Amino acid sequence: MDIQNFINQLSIDCVIFGYENQQLKVLLSKSKFKGDFYTLPSGFIFQNEDIEEAAQRVVQERTGITDIYLQHFNVFGKVSRKREEFLEKLIKLNYSESEDQQRQSDIYQWFTKRFVSIGYYSLVDIQQVTPQPSDIDESIGWYPVKDFPTLIMDYNEVLENAYLCLQSDIQDLSNIYHLLPEQFTMKEVQDIYETITGKYFARTNFQKKVLDLDVLERLDKKFTGAKNKAPYLYRFKK
Amino acid sequence: MDIQNFINQLSIDCVIFGYENQQLKVLLSKSKFKGDFYTLPSGFIFQNEDIEEAAQRVVQERTGITDIYLQHFNVFGKVSRKREEFLEKLIKLNYSESEDQQRQSDIYQWFTKRFVSIGYYSLVDIQQVTPQPSDIDESIGWYPVKDFPTLIMDYNEVLENAYLCLQSDIQDLSNIYHLLPEQFTMKEVQDIYETITGKYFARTNFQKKVLDLDVLERLDKKFTGAKNKAPYLYRFKK
DNA sequence: CCAAAAGTGTTTCACTTACACCCATGA
DNA sequence: TCATGGGTGTAAGTGAAACACTTTTGG
C-alpha cells in the first residue's frame, strides 16, 4: 500500500445500501485477520484526489459499478472511536511476542494513529453488483440492515447513523430510484419505501402521490404470468 | 503555533450566524497580511481532541461564549479549492524575493499543503458575543449574509452552502431559538424565521403554528412603552 | 367465470390559510 | 378616546387519506 501518497489520519467510510427480497441490505467485508473482524468498505485519500473521487473509488472497487450515487452524511472524529480495543484484540490474535519489530514498521505506525472518518452512504442497484473483496478481505457480502454482524471500532454507530440519514433523505422520494433497476413497477417503489421508512402506505394513494411528482414515465406493461392485471413498468425521467 | 500536535491537512471551518436589525449575519475576520484577505473562523484539530471539541474551541475563541450550538453541514475536500491562487497573491504581497528561506520553514510547509475542511455552522445570540480577533486577524466582525466581502479560497461557497443547510434545517423551527436571547416575543421569532426563509407568513397563523409545537412557555408581558397591547415574552422549554 | 391484483374516481376528513373581531396600551 | 399592534376565534379552501369501483390477467 502506497502510504506516502495518502492524506494522514483521514479515511473514507462508505455505507453501501442495496435492496433485495423485501430487505434493505448493506455491503460489509470480513477481514483476513484471525478473529471475526467485520467492517465497512473504506479507504484513504490520495494527495491528488478529491475526497468525492476517493469515495467513488472505494465503492467502485467493492461493487464493480460506475456512476455511483453518493451522499455525505457525517464525520466521525472522536479521539478514541474504540480503536484501542480493536487494535489490542487484532494484535493479540494475529501476532506473536517475537514480532515486535513489526510494530516499528510504517504500516503499523500508519494504522495505529487516530483516524477521522468521512462518512458517505451509497445507493446501488443490488442486481448490478458483484461484491469484490479487497486484498485484506476474506469475504464481502450483503447483510440485512435489521440484522448485521458486530463491526470493528465505532462502525456500528456509523452504519446506524447512515441509516437514519437515509430514512430522512428518502422522505421526498428523490433518491429512492438509485436502489432500483432501470425499469420497475409501482409496487417495487412502494415496497422499498415502506421497508426503509418502516411505515405502511395505502396502495392507491401512494400511486397517486408518486405519479403527481411527475418524475416517472410509464412504459409497457409487465406480464409476469400471474393471473391478475399486469402492472405498468416505469422509468425515472432524466 | 504548535503544529506538531495537530492533525495534518485537516481543518475546521465555522460559519457563525447571528441575528440583528432584521438581518442574518456571519462572523468574518480580516487577516493581518497585506491584501484584503477575509476568511471564516477556522482552526486545526489537536491529536487528543474530538473534532466537535475543536469546533467548540474555534467558536469560543472568536465569540467568547460557551455552550455553543454547532451543526456539521458538509466537508470540503477538493484538491485545489483555489488554494494556489490565494497563496500566490498572499506571498506576492507579503514577502520579498530575499525571504526564500521562509519557504523552507515548518509553517510554510504546513500551510501550503492541501487541506480538507470540515464545515460546521453555529447559531449564537449576537448580543452575547464580543468578537475577538485571533493573533493573525487584523479585525473580526459581523457581516450581513446578503452582503459580505469576497473570502479567500473557496470559502464563499462554504458560506453559501452553510446558509442553504441552515435554511433547510430551520424549517421545523427546532433550532431557531439559538439565535434568540433567553426571552423573546413572538414577533422576534417570526422576524428571524421570515428573514432566513425569505418568505412572509401571516402573523396570526404563525403564532398558532409555533404555539402548537408546544416548545414555548409563556412568561410575563413585555411593556415597551409603545402605545399598543404589550406582547408576551416566551422562553423555550428545556 | 373466478380470484387476485392493478388502476381510477369519489367522498371524507384534517389541516392550513385567510379574515374578522376584540383587547391592551399609552399618548 | 383613538391609533396601533397583539391575541383569539371562525370560515373558506386545499390537499391528503379512506374507500368504492372498474379493469385486466390466466387458470
Image: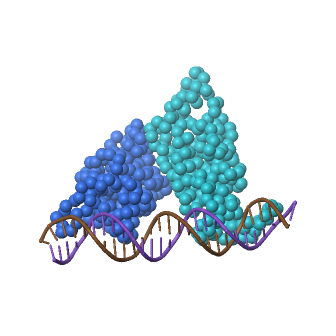
Chain colours: A cyan, B blue, C brown, D purple
Front-most of residues A102 and B14: B14
Q: Position of residue D12 (x, y in %)?
A: 45, 77
Residue placed furthest toward the top:
A97
Residue at the spot x=59%, y=67% of the render? Answer: A209
Up-down relation of residue B135 to residue A211 (above or below): above
Counting the numbered discs, the total is 0
Asked whether residue B25 appears in the rendered view, the answer is: no
Q: Position of residue A123 (x, y in %)?
A: 61, 55
Q: Position of residue C12 (x, y in %)?
A: 56, 68
Front-most of residues B145 and D22: D22
Front-most of residues A44 and D26: D26
Side of A12 where B238 appears, left or right:
left
Residue at the spot x=22%, y=63% of the render? Answer: B230
Q: Image quarter for residue B47? A: top left
Up-down relation of residue A82 to residue B43 (above or below): above
Asked whether residue A192 appears in the rendered view, the answer is: yes
Side of A74 where A220 appears, left or right:
right
Side of A164 where B126 appears, left or right:
left
Residue at the spot x=59%, y=57% of the render? Answer: A69
Front-most of residues B31 and B75: B75
Residue at the spot x=64%, y=30% of the render? Answer: A34
Q: Position of residue A107 (x, y in %)?
A: 55, 35
In which quadrant will I find the N terminus of chain B? Answer: top left
